[in-house]
Image (cartoon, coloured by chain):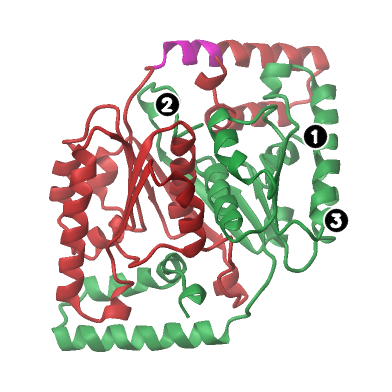
Chain colours: A green, B red
Amino acid sequence: MKNDTPPELNQDQEIGRLIDEVMSSSLTDEQYRKKMQRRKEVQDKRIAEAVPEKGLIIVNTGNGKGKTTAALGMVLRSLGHGYKVAIIQFIKGSWEPSEKRVFSYWEDQIEFHAMGEGFTWETQDRDRDLDKASAAWEKSLEYIRNPDFHLVLLDEINIALKMAYLPVEDVLAGLAQKPANKHVILTGRGAPPALIECADLVTEMTLVKHPFRDQGVKAQPGIEY
Amino acid sequence: MKNDTPPELNQDQEIGRLIDEVMSSSLTDEQYRKKMQRRKEVQDKRIAEAVPEKGLIIVNTGNGKGKTTAALGMVLRSLGHGYKVAIIQFIKGSWEPSEKRVFSYWEDQIEFHAMGEGFTWETQDRDRDLDKASAAWEKSLEYIRNPDFHLVLLDEINIALKMAYLPVEDVLAGLAQKPANKHVILTGRGAPPALIECADLVTEMTLVKHPFRDQGVKAQPGIEY
C-alpha cells in the first residue's frame, strides 16, 4: 500500500483536520489512539476506492516561489521511475548550469528545449516574443502527442498565455490530444481561468516573504538557480 | 549578470506589474519598447544594489502540493553546484524508491535520514511520535551546525511543530546557530507564526484543485513519489 499512500498526499488531504481535532481538545491517550485509528480506517478506505492511474494536467501558478522548482522535483521523481521527460521553457533562452549538470546523468531519458529569450524587457520586441512563443508551443505539441514521454513540463507557459503571446484555446486543444496516462505540468504566474478549469491538479504558490524584495538579497545558487 | 538575475526571480518580483501595465493599455510598439526599456533599467539597478550572498531560512507551508517537491528541486540545484546537502525527514520513515535512485548518483554529496514513522494515525502512539521528533531534531542540529553542509532540508518538520511534538523555541534557537551562508528549508503545513517571523523566504502552497480529493485518483508515480 505504501506507494498508494505517499505521506505527503495523506498529510495534505487529511492531517489538517486531524491536527485541528487533536489540538483543539485534551484527549486521553486512549481517546487519542481511537481517533487515530478511525482516521486510518477512513484513509485506507478512501485509498482502496481511488482510481489507480490517470495522466494529470498540473498547473503551478501564483506570485510565489516554487512553481518551476516543484516541477523540477516531479521531473526528478519521474526520472527515478525510469520515465522519459521533456522540458520546454517558454521564457528562458538557456538552461541553468547547475540544473544542466544534474540532468546530464539522464541524457537518455530527458529532452530539454529552452525556447524563450528572457523577458520582454530583455528583448523589447513584441513580434519576436510572439514568434518565440509559437515555436515553443509547436515543439511542446510534439512531446504532448508522443507516447514515449511520460511527463512534459511546459515551463513558464502561463506567462506566454497571460501576455497573449499564445491563445489559450490552442493550448487546451493540444492538451486534449495527450495520451491518457501522460502528465503535463504548466508553470508560471497568471494561469488563465480556462486552463485552471481543465486542469486536474492546481496549486497556487503565494509569496509570504521574500529576501529579494524584503531584504535586497541576490538570488542564491542552489536555491534560485 | 545572468546568474544574478534568474528569470524565475525576475518574473516573480516584476512580471506581475509588467503584465498588468501592458495588458491594461493598448500601447504602440514604440511605447511598449520604451516601457520595457524602463523596466529593464529599474531591474538592473535593483540587482546591482542587492546583497550578494546570504544563507536563507526557507519555509514551504500551506495545505497545497509542492512543499516537499519544491524543496527537492532546490536540493537538485544545490547538488548541481557541488554543495553538500542533508535531508532529515520528520514524518516519513523511509525514502521513496524513485528519489533514492536519483540521489544515489550523489552519495558523496548527500546525507539522508528518514526519522519519522508515518503519521500518527499509522503509529497511534503519541509518546513514540514525541521520541521520534526529538531524535530527528537532534540529528538536524548536527547538520545545521556543520559548516560542510550548504543546504539542510527539514522535511515535514512543521507538522511536528504543529502537533507540539517539538517546541518551536528549540527550533528557533537551533536555526540561530547556523553558519551565515547556510540555507535551511523547513517544509510542512501549519508552520508556526514564530517560525514564519524568523524566516527569510516563506511560500504558502494553496490547494486550488486536487485529483485525489476531487476525482478520487490515486497518487501517481513520478508526481507524488
Residue at the (55%, 55%) spot, across then down: A203
Residue A108 as seen in the image, left or right of residue A177: left
The answer to whether residue B219 is left or right of residue A171 is: left
Disc ID at residue B141: none
Distance Cα–Cα, label 2 vs label 3? 38 Å
Q: Position of residue A152 (x, y in %)?
A: 71, 51
Mark carried by residue A173: 3
Q: Which range is magenta?
A: B43-50
Mark 3 burial class by Cα count in 10 Å: few <14, some 14-19, many 20+: few
Whole-number angstrom distance, CA of label 2 to CA of label 1: 28 Å
Q: What's the amino acid at mark 3?
A: Ala
Give the left or right position of residue A141, taking residue A124 as reference. Answer: right
Q: What is the spatial separation of the Cα atoms under label 1 and label 3, in whole angstroms?
A: 16 Å
Query: Which residue is labeled 1 in the image?
Result: A133
Query: Could you tell which of marks 2 and 3 lies nearer the N-terminus?
Result: 3
Q: Position of residue B10 (x, y in %)?
A: 56, 26
